[in-house]
Amino acid sequence: MATIDEPLYPIAVLIDELKNEDIQLRLNSIRKLSTIARALGEERTRKELIPFLSENNDDDDEVLIAMAEELGVFIPYIGGVEHANVLLPPLETLCTVEETCVRDKAVESLCRIGAQIREQDLVEYFIPLVKRLAAGEWFTARVSSCCLFHIAYPSAPETLKTELRAIYSQLCQDDMPMVRRSAATNLGKFAATIEPAHLKTDIMSIFEDLTQDDQDSVRLLAVEGCAALGKLLEPQDCVAHILPVIVNFSQDKSWRVRYMVANQLYELCEAVGPERTSSDLVPAYVRLLCDNEAEVRIAAAGKVTKFCRILNPELAIQRIIPCVKELSTDSSQHVRSALASVIMGMAPILGKDATIEQLLPIFLSLLKDEFPDVRLNIISKLDQVNQVIGIDLLSQSLLPAIVELAEDRHWRVRLAIIEYVPLLASQLGVGFFDDKLGALCMQWLKDKVYSIRDAAANNVKRLAEEFGPDWAMQHIVPQVLDMINNPHYLYRMTILHAISLLAPVMGSEITCSTLLPVVVNTSKDRVPNIKFNVAKVLQSLIPIVDQSVVDKTIRPCLVELSEDPDVDVRFFATQALQSSDQVMMST
């Protein structure tokens, strides 16, 4: 009897757990659907499990999302694509629920199944499902249907294609703005599946309706459609149908629509060609750069380099640069920040002379901006300008401002400068570095902010790598070691950290003769934090120096520290001694 009932057990457990009040049990049950389906076999999964799921009216969104997700990958458990249609009813039900996340997941699973389903099943089951959802009484069904047309349309016979286009047109004129929004969002995907002849007639009339919608939330989604349709149409059709819409949208009464245009405009330039870009889209873009709303100016400013890349340099200098100059002193710090993040990329586009004449004053203005993010965005892209104007001019014009920023009151700005110094040093060369930046690098080791001191220690190591041990021994190491006597213990800890980073770069000889004696002397410090950091540094030096140095100098010092009254000092000293023993055993 037990053997006969055994196949029934999984479905019984599922039913019990799905009806349980505990949501976690219901979720676990849904996530085990594939396991249960394997236990039941393909036929019983189709005839018992799927119908049961169709009737399941769980009201918890998490459970329904999990179910929608599982059903999307369920084709192997029901006997393959020839039976895929049995998965459609439960997903159709989920497409009508109120919670957006559930509907989105159900639509995603339907699209996945629709892409695999056989053509006759698509016509017999999938297209009727799309039509039922599109005619749904409740708006949620109609919203979901808009996302499925691009799957249903390609395999439909001609008569059904005409009907699907007509249904989509009705959805674009639906009473509910949510449905029209969904139709506008998915228009590009649907249009990509439609034959060119119908694209110019049916789809363009649908598109024109959406562009004149009284809801700005629909119109702004139609802007995305402009870019998608622009890629599908011939250039002359794009100029005739899409260009006037974009120009009108750039003057739309809703700032959200203008914001979307500012984000999408440069994509349309390729579709309409250089001639119409110059005559129609450049004036529209200039309007957006000077828009009343800061959000629109932010979006437009963030695309200024991409837009200039499409134009010839003369046109960019004539029409765009004056707006850029205005934006560099914009009242909104976020506009200036968006501009600063991309403006350096304009240097290669405009060339050396125009960069020196037009852009350098703007760079200097932004480098002195009161808002730290603006200054940071300029600093992080300096290499793009260096490639165009050369290091001599860069150092004359921008370096004084950079040195000023090295002492900025915002620690993140100082941090950005530190991270840029090794690159700057390699470009400027040793002589220039010694004159202008050497003192700053030492100054950062005594900064009040830990992150700056830590970055400064790493910076010292990177400079030693860049210019070599001999240069470091002459210009960095003596100044670093002098700071070990600083009265503040936190600064002494930074120097210990810098020594541990410098040792591998400087090599065994300099480490033994110069760095190690300083570390050993510091083990006599009265602050326990310094002493256990000495133990850590000595542990890091063991692989670098000879075994004889370890035995004569490092181990005696660690033994002394391992008997310290402070428990942390003893711990790290003992740890370092154990590490020394392991190195001895391995060699």
Image (cartoon, rainbow, N blue to C red):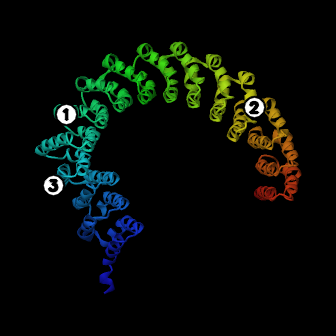
Q: Which residue is mark 2?
A: 443
| Residue nearest the viewer, comparing 67 with 232 | 67
Q: Label for residue 124? A: 3
Query: Between disc 1 and disc 2, whose residue precedes?
Result: 1
Q: Nearer the viewer, mark 1 or mark 2?
A: 2
SS class, disc 2: helix
Q: Is residue 160 visible?
A: yes
Answer with left or right where residue 240 lies relative to residue 569: left
Classify residue 131 as left or right of residue 56.
left
Separation (CA) of disc 1 from disc 2: 67 Å
Left or right of 324 in this view: 374: right
Residue designated by label 1: 199
Residue 165 position (above or below residue 14): above
Q: Quadrant of residue 75?
A: bottom left
Q: Give the CA separation, mark 3 to mark 1.
A: 26 Å
Q: Are marks 3 and 2 in contact (CB under 8 Å)?
A: no
Q: Marks 3/2: CA distance?
A: 77 Å
Q: Amino acid at mark 3?
A: Glu
Residue at left offset 28%, top offset 57%: 94
Counting residues from the start of the chain, the first of labels 3 and 1 encountered is: 3
Image quadrant containing the C terminus: bottom right
Q: Mark 3, residues whose alpha carbon is within 10 Å: few (<14), some, or many (≥20)?
A: few
